[in-house]
Amino acid sequence: MRHRKLGRSGLEVSELGYGAWGIGASHWVGADDDTSRAALRAAIAAGVNFIDTALAYGDGHSESLVGEVVRAASETIYVATKIPPRNGKWPAAPGDAVADMFPAAWINEATETSLRNLGLETIDLQQFHTWTDDWVNRGDWADAVAALKQAGKIRLFGVSIRNHDPASVLALVRSGLVDTVQVIYNVFDQSPEDELFDAALEHGVGIIVRVPFDEGGLTGRIRPDTTFPDGDFRNDYFSGERKRETYERVQAITADLGITDEQVASVALRFCLSQAAVSTVIAGMRALENVGRNVAALEQPPLDAAQLAKLRAHRWNLDA
């Protein structure tokens, strides 16, 4: 497992990270705790040393599972979690008051709750679970974050930004107040390349890529007749003509690169890691087979310039 610097933090994180949304038993139907523990342990055994969770994932259930496995591990594992907005509004929009969403008292309360759930003394990376650049010079959040760092409750601070809106964090990146940014980036949504990646490199901000497989769209497994269990968020994500459009676009990718449907996920993961600004890519891996698939993808050679050029032609401007 190769490692990269997490911005200017000095931490070296695995190129493949573990995204722990799916194991929280909310939104994704079918999560099983024993299977989740086994997948976490397998990922760590394969060299994954960065796990991303959130207080909102199963109301702390994901954090509890992550903490249980991390505390038992002999390896050094870096844990990132997230504070949900106090008023429960997702995503943040320009004009929303930071005092309603991330006041200092809530930042402290949520951090203490996450520390208890995880069973850890320090959170390696604490993040806001939504963001708008209107907040850069407003509210008391920055002082609260600084105080948590000073007290040793958190090591680093980051934000997870709105879907398909990387421009919403540029002012924060340039402010020096943030250590990492978590952003959607994949073959379909290439918008972080426009401005964010260059700004992150210039200011030493680590980039954590989420949704590398477009919630399964870039695995080659979504077809026009694919169904999901009742209550699974993918019923909304792939509503209307989205499944058909996704399938057709993936077929165009396989034809363009001369690959099979089974190779799409490997290509998608390596596409994300083609960017120097990217520190780690967090993939959801609830099943052992997914851990193995993603680890094997990183054993393949990096994509070459010709492959990357072809993939850039498959950009899909998705709605925020």
Image (cartoon, rainbow, N blue to C red):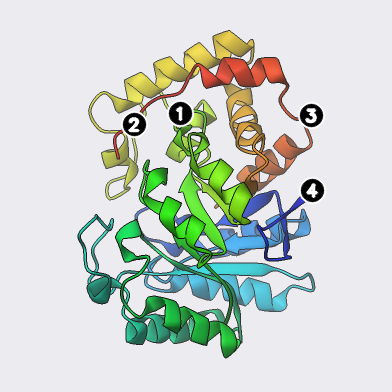
Mark 1, residue position: 188
Q: Earlier in the sequence, mark 3 or mark 4?
A: 4
Quadrant of the frame with the C terminus: top left
Instruction: Examine the rendering and report whether any part of residue 161 can be seen.
Output: no
Residue 221, horizontal then vertical, whole percent: 49, 28
Q: Which element is circle 3 on?
A: loop
Amino acid residing under circle 3: Pro
Q: Residue at x 55, y 79 (%)?
A: 118
* 183, 133: nearer the viewer: 133
Q: CA distance from mark 4 to mark 1?
A: 25 Å
Residue 230, horizontal then vertical, whole percent: 27, 46
Labelled disc at residue 301: 3
Q: Earlier in the sequence, mark 3 or mark 1?
A: 1
Q: CA distance from mark 3 to mark 1?
A: 21 Å
Q: Residue at x 49, y 12 (%)?
A: 252
Q: Earlier in the sequence, mark 2 or mark 4?
A: 4
Amino acid residing under circle 2: Leu
Q: Earlier in the sequence, mark 4 or mark 1?
A: 4
Q: Residue at x 47, y 48 (%)?
A: 183
**How many labels were placed on the picture?**
4
Is residue 219 left or right of 106 when viewed as pictured?
right
Mark 4, residue position: 2
Q: Which element is circle 1 on?
A: loop
Mark 2, residue position: 318
* 123, 44: nearer the viewer: 123
For marks 3 and 2, give the one nearer the viewer.
2
For residue 190, above or below residue 91: above
- Disc 3, disc 4: CB below 8 Å? no
